[in-house]
Every structure is written in C-alpha cells, then in structure tokens.
Image (cartoon, rainbow, N blue to C red):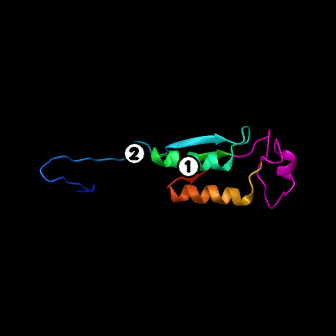
C-alpha cells in the first residue's frame, strides 16, 4: 500500500490520516498588536499540536514598524509603538528557526 499501516494484532483497523488542505495557517498581526516573544513561541507549539503549517506573520505596516533591520537601524525605534516593543534580528531568527523545527513555514 501507498500509506503506512499500523496493525494491532486481532483488530482489523486501517487509519489513513492526511490533511485536506495543504495551507493550514494562522495569521498574527504584530504590526498593530505587539506580541511578546514567549507568546509567539507558545503559538508555534499550539500550531504544531493542531497540525497548522503556515505562520503568516504581519510584522510591519504603515501604522508601525517594530522590526529592527540592519539596512534601516533607526526605523524600528522611530516606527514602533513603544521602544520596548521591537523585534530584533535575533528574535526573527529564533521564531523562524523554532517554526522550522515544528514543521511550520513563516511567511
């Protein structure tokens, strides 16, 4: 068979489990509503438990730019709602890496 089978001796059961949709995602809008890192990482755990595979991270917008970049280092400090509500390059790397470990793609 094309699908792996798991057999329990004496019980004739076949379970075929595959997602109906290839894009199973969640969008977070941190451009308008800052979320602390631990909450985003907790969301990744919840996504993995529920077999979601895409995190659509709306990190910047005309209302706010809370993402610190190398090309425009002052933009986040002037564009974020609060100086303490900024995602560093390391924060972004951490989220992308932790999502990868859980089979989640960040877009």
Provide the residue designation for mark 1: 44
* Residue 51 visible in this rendered orientation of the protein: no
Which residue is nearer to you in this view: 60 or 2? 60
* In this view, the mark in front (2 or 1): 1
**Residue 78 highlighted magenta (yes or no):** yes
Q: Are marks 2 and 1 in contact (CB under 8 Å)?
A: no
Q: Which residues are magenta?
A: 59-85
Q: Viewed as shown, does residue 65 lie left or right of 38? A: right
Under tag 2, what secondary structure? loop
Task: Indicate the quadrant containing the N terminus: top left, top right, bottom left or bottom right.
Answer: bottom left
Residue 106 appears in the picture as rendered: yes
Please rate how many residues cluster around mark 2, counting C-alpha atoms within 10 Å: few if below 14, some from 14 to 19, many from 20.
few
Task: Residue 19: name its quadrant.
Answer: top left
Q: Position of residue 13 (x, y in %)?
A: 19, 46
Q: Is residue 103 above or below residue 46?
A: below
- Residue at the (59%, 60%) spot, across then down: 97
Q: Quadrant of residue 79?
A: top right
Residue pictured at 87% horizontal, 54% vertical = 74
Q: Is residue 94 above or below residue 76?
A: below
The residue carrying mark 2 is 19
- Image point (78%, 55%), residue name: 68
Front one among 106 and 66: 66
Q: Measured from the top left, where is residue 89 in percent x and y?
A: 73, 59
Q: Is 67 one of the magenta-colored residues?
A: yes
**Direction left: furthest residue:** 10
- The secondary element bearing badge 1 is classed as helix
| Disc with the residue nearer the chain's start (2 vs 1) | 2
The residue lying at 69 percent from left, 56 percent from top is 91
Q: How many angstroms separate mark 2 from mark 1 (CA)?
A: 18 Å
Residue 46 is situated, as x and y percent measured from the top left of the image, at 51, 45
């Amino acid at each position: 068979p094309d699908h792996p089978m798991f057999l329990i001796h004496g019980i004739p059961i076949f379970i075929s489990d595959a997602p109906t949709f290839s894009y199973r995602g969640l969008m977070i809008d941190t451009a308008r509503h800052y979320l602390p890192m631990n909450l985003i990482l907790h969301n990744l755990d919840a996504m993995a438990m529920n077999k979601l595979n895409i995190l659509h991270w709306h990190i910047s917008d005309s209302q706010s730019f809370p993402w610190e970049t190398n090309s425009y280092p002052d933009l986040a400090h002037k564009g974020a709602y609060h100086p303490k509500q900024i995602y560093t390059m390391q924060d972004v790397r951490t989220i992308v890496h932790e999502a990868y470990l859980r089979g989640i793609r960040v877009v």
